[in-house]
């Protein structure tokens, strides 16, 4: 016997019935995770799965309740890693208050267990490079989009500017001043 849902909603063609369910997962629904989720929802990219160790977070419920105004087919929430199964893309903004070891030792292993072929995007702290490019632009009196560079290492004192790759609108600062960064 068909369920009420099956009676009300039926695919028009066989092809429509076999469309794969694409899912984007966001693991860790803090401020950065919410920003990621809202950005994904705004683009109507795929079903969205929000995973957090606190599965009753009000923010996740708010997003679900707002689906009336969205094109996104479904928003699933939970704390069980099995909801991430067969995902195409997994975003990990979960910092667990700077306990990256926990994130990579436990969270990533679970993601790979349930979605071995997924693309994992680790959302990290961009503050150092943004600050550096902003200050460089202020110094030269130009827009920050014209400034380019890299900072390697961890956030804070252990970050290292890669001076050989710093440029303004494609012009290497080391070419202009070989003493730059020494």
Image (cartoon, rainbow, N blue to C red):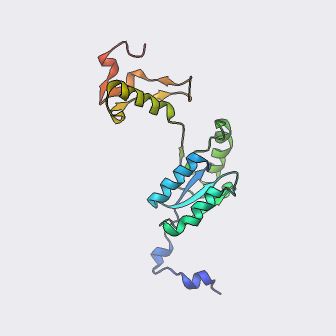
Identified at 60% across, 81% down, the residue is 5
Report how many numbered discs are placed on residues in the image: 0
Q: Identify the image quadrant of the C terminus.
A: top left
Residue 23 at x, y = what percent?
Answer: 54, 59
Can residue 142 be seen here? The reply is yes
Looking at the image, which is closer to me, 123 or 107? 123
Measured along the vertical axis of the image, is residue 63 above or below residue 122?
below
Q: How far across and down, in percent of the image, does residue 171 sit? A: 29, 25
Is 99 placed left or right of 136 in the picture? Answer: right
Q: Quadrant of the N terminus?
A: bottom right
Residue 118 visible? The answer is no
Q: Residue at x 66, y 41 (%)?
A: 96
- The residue lying at 36 percent from left, 34 percent from top is 144
Residue at the far bottom: name it: 1
Q: Is residue 7 above or below residue 118?
A: below
Give the x, y percent position of residue 161.
Answer: 46, 23
In the displayed structure, 41 sits above or below 156; it is below
Residue depicted at x 67% and y 36%: 99
Q: Position of residue 13 (x, y in %)?
A: 45, 80
Q: Is residue 145 left or right of residue 16?
A: left
């Amino acid at each position: 016997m068909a369920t009420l849902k099956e009676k009300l909603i039926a695919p028009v063609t066989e092809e429509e019935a076999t469309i794969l369910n694409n899912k984007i997962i966001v693991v860790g629904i803090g401020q950065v995770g919410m920003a990621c989720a809202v950005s994904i929802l705004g683009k109507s990219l795929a079903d969205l799965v929000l995973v957090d160790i606190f599965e009753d977070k009000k923010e996740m419920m708010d997003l679900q309740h707002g689906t009336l105004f969205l094109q996104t087919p479904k928003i699933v929430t939970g704390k069980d890693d099995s909801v991430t199964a067969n995902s195409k893309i997994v975003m990990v903004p979960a910092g667990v208050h700077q306990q990256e070891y926990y994130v990579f030792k436990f969270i990533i292993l679970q993601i790979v267990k349930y979605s071995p072929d997924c693309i994992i995007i680790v959302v990290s702290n961009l503050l150092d490079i943004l600050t550096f490019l902003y200050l460089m632009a202020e110094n030269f009196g130009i827009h920050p989009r014209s400034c380019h560079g890299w900072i390697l290492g961890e956030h804070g004192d252990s970050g290292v500017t890669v001076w050989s790759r710093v440029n303004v609108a494609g012009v290497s600062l080391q070419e202009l001043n070989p003493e730059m960064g020494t």
